[in-house]
Image: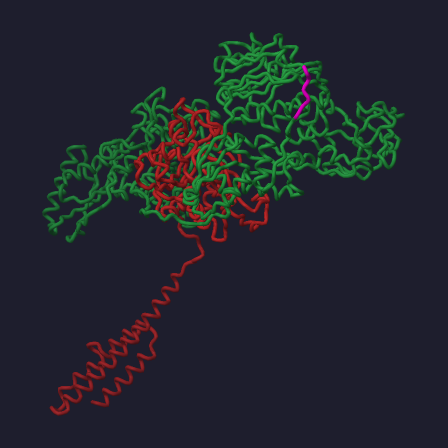
Amino acid sequence: MLVSLNWLKNYVDIKDMDPEVLAEKITKTGIEVDGIEYVAEKSENVVVGYVESCEEHPNADKLHLCQVDVGDETLQIICGAPNVAQGQKVAVAKPGAVLPGNFKIKKVKLRGVESNGMICSLQELGIEEKYVPKDAADGIYVFSEDVMVGDVVESLLNLNDAVLEFDLTPNRADCLSMLGVAYEVAAILDQPVQLPNPAPTMAKEAAQDFISVRVEAPEDNPYYGAFIIRDVTIKPSPLWMSNYLIAAGIRPINNVVDITNYVLLEYGQPLHAFDYDKLNSDQIAVRRAKDKEVLVTLDGHERILSHDHLVITNGAEPIALAGVMGGLATEVTDSTKNVLLEAAYFTGDVVTNAVKETGLRSESSTRFTKGVDPNRVKEAGIRACELLEKYADATILSGVVEYDQLDRSEKQVEMDMHEMNRRLGTNLQADDVKNALKRLKFNYEQKASTFIVHVPTRRGDITIFEDMLEEVARIYGYDNLPYTLPDGVGQAGGLTERQQLIRNIKKLLEGAGLMESHTYSLISQETKDQLISPEVSEANYMPIQLALPMSEDHKYLRLSLLPEILRVLAYNKARNQLDLGYYEIGKTFLTQETVLTKQPDERLRLAGALTGNWLHHPWQQEKKQVDFYVVKGILERLFDYLGFSVEYKPFKHKDMHPGRTASLHLQGKTIGFLGQVHPRIQNQWDLKETYVFDINLEELLVAYKPVTSYQEVPKYPSIGRDIAFVIDESILADDIKKVIKEVGKPLVKDVSVFDVYEGENLEAGKKSVAYHIVYQHPEKTLTDNEIQASYDHIIDAVKEKYQAYIRS
Amino acid sequence: MKDQLKAIETEALEKIAKTEDIKKLQDIKVAYLGKKGSLTSVLRGMGKLSKEERPVVGELANAVRQQITASLEEKMEKLEQIALEKQLEQEAIDVTLPGRPIKLGGPHLLTKIMEEIEDLFIGMGFEVREGPEVETDYYNFEALNLPKNHPAREMQDTFFITKDLLMRTQTSPVQARTMEAYGGNKPVKMISPGKVYRRDTDDATHSHQFTQIEGLYVDKHVRMSDLKGVLDIFAKKIFGNDRDIRLRPSFFPFTEPSVEMDISCKICQGKGCSVCKGSGWIEILGAGMVHPNVLSMAGYDPNVYSGFAFGMGPERIAMLKYGVKDIRQFYTNDIRFLKQYHNA
C-alpha cells in the first residue's frame, strides 16, 4: 500500500512531521514502512505558463515558436511537442530551472532562434511513465483546470509529495484504505480522524424505478447495493484526484473510472461502474456461475466459468465476475451516459477461488480476499455518488437499490487487566488501557478489572483477547515492556545421544581433512538416478517428484547426496581449486509409492567426494593423489572410532569404476559403497579421477554402542610372526585374513597386511601378500611351541584352501 | 716411592687438563691406569716395601688412582658433551621450510552458526528437536493456525508434492509435533533447526532451500517480557554485548501478539547507514506469543498454558555477522569461501 502523505493530511493532522520520523513511528508501533519515495525527484523553477502564441519555427518543420506568459515575464520558448497550442496552460521550466536527473535548463539557440526555457511533459517533471495519463503521454502536459499563471508546478502537481510504502501483513487489511491508515496514524500520534461524511444531492427520481437487485447466493454476497447515476460527463478527473492516484500508483483514466479507484483507495471498498444502457435489462441478479458459462472480461479475455465462481448477471447473462473484474460488454467508455454503480460485499472465499483459477489479481480482488469493512460498503457508494455529482456533472437518482443480509455488528472482546499484565509481564493500570483504547478509537465498557471492548468492524483482524493484548501492548509501546527471564521449572537442556554422535562424526571427518558442504535436496532429472547406493536401489525406492517445480534443476527429492556433491567439486574445479575433499550429512527421501499417499522415510546419509592431491609436499618429494585407499582410510578411522568392523566387498555399479568399487557391510547389512566414479560420470562433471563414498548413517547411529565397561589391559606379552603367501591375483587379501583368523583362534589377536607384491620373480597371474600375525593370550605368556603349532596349522589351511605357497 | 707417586699424579693431572681429544684421553688412561701403565708398575714395587710402609703407600696409591680416575671421567664427560654439541650443530635443519601438510577440514559456516545458536539455547535449558522435511498440510499450515484459504498462506510459496504433502516451508511444524508428543501437560522448551523450502527463484537474496531455527517455550505463566529477555540474551551472545534489541508489531498466524525483532546496527552505532537502510536497526527474526489456537490444537489448554515462539534464518544471521553478500554462497560451497570460516 502506497500512502501519500498529502492525501493522508485530509484525515489526520500529521503536522509538518518529517516523513522519516513519521515512518519510524509507524514502523515501531504498527506497520513496517518499507521505504519513502517522492512522487517525483525535486525540480526547481518550474511554473505555470500561458501559451500566448504558437507559430511554426521558421527553420524547422517539427518545432514550434511559442510566446509564453509565466507571470512576471513572457518567454520565447521553442517546443517540439506535437500537442502544444495557443491558449494552453503548461508547465514551464524557466532558464535556471533544474529538472529531475539534475537536468539544468539554460537559454539556448535552436536552429538560429533563441529559446528561453522548456515546456515540460509529466515524464520530464519526474513522473513515472506508467502513471502518466494516456493523452499526456506523447507530449507536453496541459493543465485542464484553471490554474494561476506563475504558480509553482511542483505543488500543483503534487510532485513533492512523500509516499510511504507500507509492507502490510495479511491481518492488516484495514490499512488497504486511506481511512484505515488514518485511524492507525491517528492512534500512533494520538490525534482525531476527520471522515469524509459524503452527502450527495439526490434527484427526485428513484433508482428503484430503473433497477432491481436479486441475490441468489447470499452466503457469497450478503450485501449488494446499486446506485443509478444519470447523464455523466466523461472527462479528466480534477487535478487533486489525479495527483493522489498517481501518488498511490494508479494511472488516471477518466473521471468515472478514477472516482471508483479513488473511493477504493479511500474506503478500501471496491466499486464497479457498469454502463447502464448496455445492461440490456433493468435487473441485477447475483448467482454462482453455471459450469462452462462464458464471460468476456474487461481485459478482452474469454473466461470459462464454473460453479465455484460468483457472477453478476443482468438476469440472464453474466456481466461481471464478482469482486474480480467487470465484463467488456458493459464497460464504461467515453460515450457512456448513465451508470449503474455497484457497492457490494463479496466474501473472501468466493473471490479467492476466482483469483486462483483466473489468475486475475487486482486492487479489488485483493481487498475482498482479505475482507472489507461491512460498515463502509454502502457509504463508499455514496461517496462515489458525491464525487460523480461534483466532477462528472451527474444526476444521482435517490435511494440505493439493495439486497442486505450483511452482519454489521461489532465483536466484543473481554480483556481482564490482571490476565493482561500476567501475559505481558507488565504492571499496566486501567488508565494505560483506557488511553490505548481512546487512541485506537475503540469503544468499551469497564466492569471492575475487565474491559469489554467493542471492536470496530474496520478491524476484522481482532477477534480474541490476544488480539486486544497486542493492540494495547503496541500502543503502550513494546519498548516499555520489561526484560525478564522465564521463572518456570528448569529442565536440563542438551543434545540427545544421537545428535551428539552426529556432531562427533562430523568433527572426526573434519579432523581427517574433509570440508563440510551444504547442497540442495532437490535435484534434476539427469542426476536423480545417479550414484544410488545398492541397498537403496535394491529396495526399489524411487525419487519423489515435485508437483510444480520452479526449475528443471530442482525437480526431484534426492535419493543420494552424491550428484550435488560432485557439482560442488565441479564448481570448485572450474575455479581452479583442484585438491578437494568434501563430506555432507543430509536427508534422502525414500518411498516405494508411485503416487505418494504418505510421508516418505527420511533417512540421513553420510556421503563425500574427493579428488586431486591428498598430500602434496614437494620439497620432500612427497605426493599422494586421492585414491581408493585414501578414502577407505578415512572411513576406517570413522568405523574404528565407532567400534565397528565393516566388511568391504568388490562391487559393480553402473556409475562406478567396475574394478575400484566396494560395497560396505556392517553386521550383515549393506550400508553403502565406496570407490572411483565411472569415467563417464567424471566426464559429465569435467572431473579427473574422483572417489566417493555414501553410507546409510542411520545404520551407523543404530549400531553404535558406547563403551560402558572396563576391559583389562593385557598383562602378557604379544608375539608377532610374519608370513607371505603367493596366491592367485583374483584372491582377496581379506579372504586369506579370514582363514588366518579362523584357524588361529583363540591365540591370534590381530592380522594385518604389510606387503603386497606382483611382478618379477613371480609367475604371471600371481601375487604375494604378506601378513603380520599377532599372538597373545590373556592369561599367560605363549611358548614358542604353542605359537609354532598354530602357525603351521594356519599355513596348511591357507595352502589347502587357496592353493597358496609360502614365499621365501 | 711416595715421591714417585706424587710425581705420577701431578704429571697425569697436568696431561689430562691439557688434553682436548677423546682418543688422547683414552691413551692417557691406558698410560697411567692400564696394566702396563706407570701407576700400575709403581704399585708392583710395593712388595719391596717394609710392613710399616706398605699400608701408608697403599693408601696414597689408592688416593692417586682415584684422583686420576675422577679427573679422567670429568674430562671425558666434558669432551663428550662438546663432541655431541658439535655433532648436533651439523644436524641443523632449515626450520623455515614448509611442514608436511595435513589437510584442514572444517564445518560449513551455516553449521557453525547453527551449532552456536543451538548451544546458546541448550545452555538456557532448551532441547533440540527435529522433524520431517516432507510435511503434511496439517502440520505445516493447519496446526499452525493457517487453515486452507487463509490469506497468510500467500506469504509463502510452497513446493507441493501432492495436495496434502509438501516441502516444509518453515521449521514451525516441529513445534506442533513436539507439543503433541508432550501431551498437553508438561512444559516444552525446544529449538528446531533444519532445512526449509520455498518456491523462489534463486538470486542474491532468495534461495529455494535455506535453513531456519525455530524456538518454543510453553509453560504456565510465560510472559511476553520473558520473550524479550531471552531474545536480548540471544542478540548479545550472537552479535555482541553492545547490541540492543527492539520489538515491533508484525503478523504470524501462529503467534499473537506477533513481533519482529531488530538489533541495533553495529556498523553505524544506530545512526543509520546502508546496511540498516538508514534506520539504525536491522531485522533479525520474527517472534511472538503462541496463538491460543495453536496451543489448543496441540492439546494445551490456553487458559492454563502460554508460551512464546521465535524463528530465525541462520543464513541471514551469517550474512549480517560476517558481511556475506549473496545467499547463494552458502550453497555453491566454494572452498575459498568455506575456508575463511575455519576459526569463526
Front residue (pair A123, A270): A270
Dividing the image into 4 quarters, which one contains the N terminus of chain A? top right
Q: Quadrant of residue A657?
A: top left
Which chain is drawn using green? Answer: A
| A332 over B73 or under it: above or below | above
Residue ranking furthest to the front: A447
Which one is nearer the viewer's eye here, B44 or A562? A562
Q: Which residue corresponds to the image point at 39% horizontal and 24% vertical from the top-left?
A: B164
What x and y, as percent, mark residue A454?
49, 34
Q: Which residues are magenta?
A: A199-204
Q: Does residue A284 sit above or below A372 in this rendering?
A: above
Q: Colour mode?
A: by chain
Please say if B46 is above or below A59: below
Say whether residue B213 is visible: no
As for residue B21 lying within the magenta part, the answer is no
With A625 as the anchor, is A710 left or right in this view?
left
Residue B22 seen: yes
Q: Find residue B71 and report its horizontal and vertical position in percent.
A: 28, 79
Query: In the image, A785: left or right of A225?
Result: left
Q: How many marks?
A: 0
Colour seen for chain B: red
Reply yes or no: does residue A203 show up in magenta.
yes
Relative to A674, does residue A511 appear above or below in the rendering? Answer: below
Residue A466 x/y as whole percent:
44, 37
Q: Nearer the viewer, residue B297 or A757?
A: B297
Residue A94 in the image: state x and y as whole percent. 82, 36
User: Residue B41 falls in which quadrant of the image?
Assistant: bottom left
Locate the C terminus of chain A by quadrant. top left
